[in-house]
């Protein structure tokens, strides 16, 4: 591309390489299409539109709502995403890719590389925001949701249920512990409870009936 004087963005080339799925011929064919589609330039936005790829910022917003345990906000993001009629299996694939990079950042921070598709600062922020067990749970649920997506009555509904499942099965330790008001106002402290002797509530013995004596036989 440099020899031919064709400007290209690194993120756009990575999208093409990923879409080529290991095939050099397919990747070169997509590159030619991208050059024609972009009027002689290979830009990330144009390549994403050509490939039908989803904007990664939308995936990031979904993960932020999951981290905040914000179910209403999560469904609002899905509604905004649905306006572009996306491929929900591809959206889950992007979410899986993001979660994998977050998990890698948590386990081996030095292994983080700049791939032009994910902001390293953003990955570190998610690595600090999400507990590792949440990342692993989200990844597993997204993986199963992507597998079962063709079985859902409609793709959006299956996608929403996958995200809601992440919130429902999130470990309780990840959520802030709150005590209901009625519990705090009605439960008396331990010091205010008067101990009751163990014998006060002990059951009373039930008297046994007197034995019945049979009369001696009458003498003739």
Image: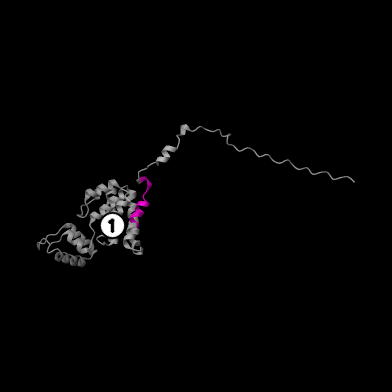
Question: For residue 172: magenta?
Answer: yes
Residue ID for mark 1: 79
- Magenta extent: 161-173
In the image, 6: left or right of 174?
left
Residue 159 image point, x, y percent: 32, 59
- Residue 100 in view in this figure: no
> Please, what secondary structure does the residue beneath circle 1 have?
helix
Residue at position x 21%, y 67% from top? 26
Q: In the rendered image of this protein, does residue 108 appear above or below residue 48?
A: above
Q: In the rendered image of this protein, does residue 121 appear above or below residue 53?
A: above
Which of the two residues, 112 or 8, is positioned nearer the viewer here?
A: 8
Residue 210 image point, x, y percent: 73, 40
- Give the main secondary structure of the magenta stretch: helix
Q: In the rendered image of this protein, does residue 154 appear above or below residue 127?
A: below
Graded by Cα atoms within 10 Å as few (under 14), some (14 to 19) or many (20 or more), the crowding at tag 1 reads: few
Which of the two residues, 10 or 65, is positioned nearer the viewer here?
A: 65
Residue 77 image point, x, y percent: 27, 54
Which of the two residues, 16 or 51, is positioned nearer the viewer here?
A: 51
For the N terminus, which image quadrant? bottom left
Q: In the rendered image of this protein, does residue 144 appear above or below residue 182?
A: below
Question: For residue 131: magenta?
Answer: no
């Amino acid at each position: 591309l440099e020899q031919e004087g064709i400007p290209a963005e690194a993120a756009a080339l990575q999208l093409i390489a990923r879409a080529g799925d290991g095939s050099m011929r397919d990747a070169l064919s997509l590159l030619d299409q991208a050059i024609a589609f972009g009027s002689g330039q290979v830009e990330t936005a144009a390549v994403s539109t050509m490939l039908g790829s989803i904007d990664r910022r939308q995936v990031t917003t979904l993960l932020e709502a999951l981290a905040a345990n914000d179910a209403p906000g999560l469904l609002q993001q899905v509604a905004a995403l649905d306006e572009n009629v996306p491929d929900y299996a591809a959206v889950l694939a992007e979410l899986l890719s993001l979660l994998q990079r977050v998990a890698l950042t948590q386990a081996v921070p030095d292994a983080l590389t700049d791939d032009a598709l994910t902001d390293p600062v953003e990955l570190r922020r998610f690595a600090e925001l999400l507990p590792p067990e949440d990342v692993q749970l989200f990844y597993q649920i997204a993986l199963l949701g992507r597998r079962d997506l063709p079985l859902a009555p409609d793709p959006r509904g299956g996608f929403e249920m996958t995200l809601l499942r992440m919130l429902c099965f999130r470990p309780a330790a990840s959520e802030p512990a709150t005590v209901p008001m009625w519990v705090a106002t009605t439960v008396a402290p331990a010091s205010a409870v008067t101990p009751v002797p163990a014998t006060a509530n002990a059951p009373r013995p039930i008297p046994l009936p007197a034995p019945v004596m049979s009369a001696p036989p009458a003498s003739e």
